[in-house]
Image (cartoon, rainbow, N blue to C red):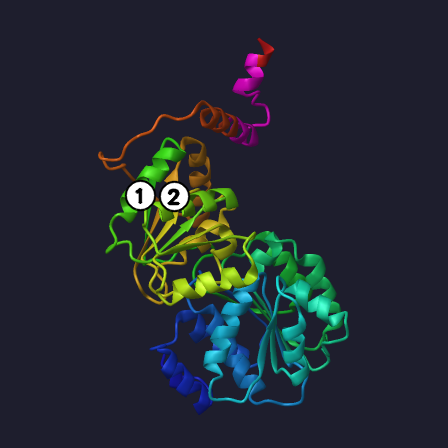
Amino acid sequence: MEWTDFKLNKQLFQAIEESGFSSPTEIQQKCIPLILGGQQVIGIAQTGTGKTAAYVLPLLMKVKFAQGTEPRALVLVPTKELAVQILSHATKLSKYTDLRIAALYGGVGPKTQLDELRKGVDILISTPGRFLEIYLRNEITVKQIKTLVLDEADRMMDMGFMPQLRKIFEVIPSKRQNLLFSATFPEKVERLMKEFIEFPERVEITPQATTAKQVEQEVYHIPNLRTKINFLEHLLADHEGFNRVMIFARTKQNADNIFRYLERKKLGPLRVVHSNKGQNTRINAMNEFKEGHLRILVSTDVASRGIDVVKVSHVINFDVPVFYDDYVHRIGRTGRAFQEGKAITFATKAELYHIQKIEKLIREKIKVKKLPSEIKIEETSPEEALEMAREIDRQKKREDPEYGGAFHERKGR
């Protein structure tokens, strides 16, 4: 299909051409006609496949031109980062229209957002918490909302947004078009769907939790934290190959430690983002990375979604995620828009359990690679060895509740 096969106006075609979208992706081909036709739609597709444009383009076409002051479409997202990302996409695609698009999110004072709302908004992008906060101040009139989009529904469920979503469903008009998009479709998302969508068209581009084909995946078995650091330094010494890298850590403390170490070794330019960083700091860091001013972005899972950078050469999972869907989202930061990418995962003995679970989720084996011989293998500290042994005990107990555990047996003797 070509873009001209869709019933869009010339203003949108012009913006699409300028955005460099050569041809529509599979999810865009399937969802755009359904949404334009007024259908209720559930779109399931891996990250990096063009989900945002799949609903933003028909939304811009339906709303068409600025009218009144009240929003006519509402897009709900789980994080500030994603709200900013979608606002940026929608603003580019609506460049040749007079549509007014605004984003509401926490972490900053509401004054600027309120000023924008009062001027009049056609499409509103918001996190559930900030939407309710401003609605309860009587600052949002909802009676004109004809379309509701829930983006990254799986993450909304993981973050416990269900009570807030129910309140929003109660206050916005019941006669509306509902669209739900998600990279994965676990049971809890299915339950959510049944609460607010009737007779939807389900568009599943790939089986859920499928990784992008153009991402090459590797896992290295690494004995401890200090050896992980040695290997990371070794990889990043290749400035040409590892030219734009995202490094994911499980905790804020690990992310900060990695950042400080790499900065000391002058392997940047780099920044670190996690939930302790202020909203503006996070947005600025992501924009710098996107614009190519940074070589490395170190992050917790706060950035595994909601950042769209086309030429990320590598994703490095310094720690294996314990929420397995996050693996799909993390590695989806590379191999976007038909580019090739590589995802490298470091796994200690205690993390191999999670690798097995991830392989089950993505229905494929991750290629195991050997550590290069020049990497210095450090001694595992007694504290780390003990913590890993305890973690392996917990995993065995999870699989077999009857398992007493090595520590338990010793205690018994």
Q: Position of residue 150 (x, y in %)?
A: 59, 67
Q: Position of residue 117 (x, y in %)?
A: 66, 79
Q: Main secondary structure of the magenta part?
A: helix
The relative height of residue 154 versus residue 251 in the rendered view (above or below) is below
Rendered-image quadrant of the C terminus: top right
Q: Nearer the viewer, residue 42 or 261?
A: 261
Q: In the image, which disc is placed on residue 233?
A: 1
Q: Nearer the viewer, mark 2 or mark 1?
A: 2
Amino acid residing under circle 2: Tyr
Task: Give the quarter of the image for residue 130.
Answer: bottom right
Task: Give the quarter of the image for residue 382.
Answer: top left
* CB-based contact (under 8 Å), mark 2 and mark 1: yes
> Would you name the residue on which mark 2 appears?
261
Q: Residues within 10 Å of mark 1 (few under 14, many from 20)?
A: some
The magenta stretch is 393-410
Residue 57 is inside the magenta segment: no
Callout 2: SS: helix
Left or right of 368, for residue 249:
right
